[in-house]
Image: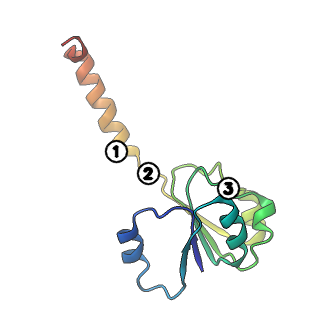
């Protein structure tokens, strides 16, 4: 089973996972996540979803965690390595957007846009 902690982008998830034969479930609460995670082969989590070693140790079928974020602070990486769980994330997903916003703010300041 692939366990998601959020419905993310349903059309994208369906498109990307259409060839995957594993069933998909969405855990809408922390309690549901804790209950279903030990049955999962893959987790897709948000940065606010903590995945500590105590939970990972109960996930005997877990092969991979996809973190829908740049950082990895919410995952116990040492436990993942010890248990052979691969971790993937989106390290450069915000790089361009951050650069564009910074450029826009600099232009606004240079043109004194906030003053009207």
Cα separation, mark 1 vs mark 3, equals 25 Å
Q: Which residue is mark 1?
A: 96
- Label pair 1/3, CB-CB below 8 angstroms: no
Say which quadrant the N terminus sits in.
bottom right
Residue 91 location (% of width, % of height): 49, 53
**What residue do we see at 71% from left, 80% from top?**
61
Which percent across, then down, holds residue 7?
Answer: 47, 64
Asked whether disc 1 touches disc 2, contact meaning CB atoms under 8 Å apart, the reply is yes
Contact? badges 3 and 2 (CB < 8 Å):
no
Give the CA distance from mark 1 to mark 2: 8 Å
Q: Is residue 10 left or right of residue 86?
A: left
N-terminal of the pair, mark 3 or mark 2, is 3
Q: Please tell me which of labels 1 and 3 falls first in the chain.
A: 3
- Residue 112 lies, with reference to residue 13, above or below; the image says above
**Residue situated in front as seen by the camera: 63 or 11:** 11
Q: Secondary structure at mark 1?
A: helix
Residue under label 3 = 75
- Are there few (<14), some (14-19), or many (20+) residues within 10 Å of tag 1? few
In the displayed structure, 106 sits above or below 80; it is above
Kindly state the secondary structure of the residue where label 2 is placed: loop
Front of the two marks 3 and 2: 3
Residue placed under numbered mark 2 in the picture: 92
Task: Tell me the colour scheme of the image.
Answer: rainbow
Q: Residues within 10 Å of mark 2 (few under 14, many from 20)?
A: few
């Amino acid at each position: 089973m692939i366990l998601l902690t959020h419905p993310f982008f349903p059309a994208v998830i369906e498109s990307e996972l259409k060839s995957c034969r594993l069933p998909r479930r969405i855990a809408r609460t922390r309690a549901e996540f804790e209950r279903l995670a030990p049955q999962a082969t893959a987790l897709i989590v948000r940065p606010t979803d903590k995945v500590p070693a105590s939970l990972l140790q109960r996930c005997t079928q877990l092969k991979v965690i996809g973190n829908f974020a740049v950082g990895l602070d919410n995952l116990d990486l040492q436990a993942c390595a010890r248990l052979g769980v691969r971790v993937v994330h989106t390290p450069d997903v915000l790089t361009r957007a951050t650069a564009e916003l910074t450029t826009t703010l600099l232009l606004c300041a240079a043109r004194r846009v906030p003053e009207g």
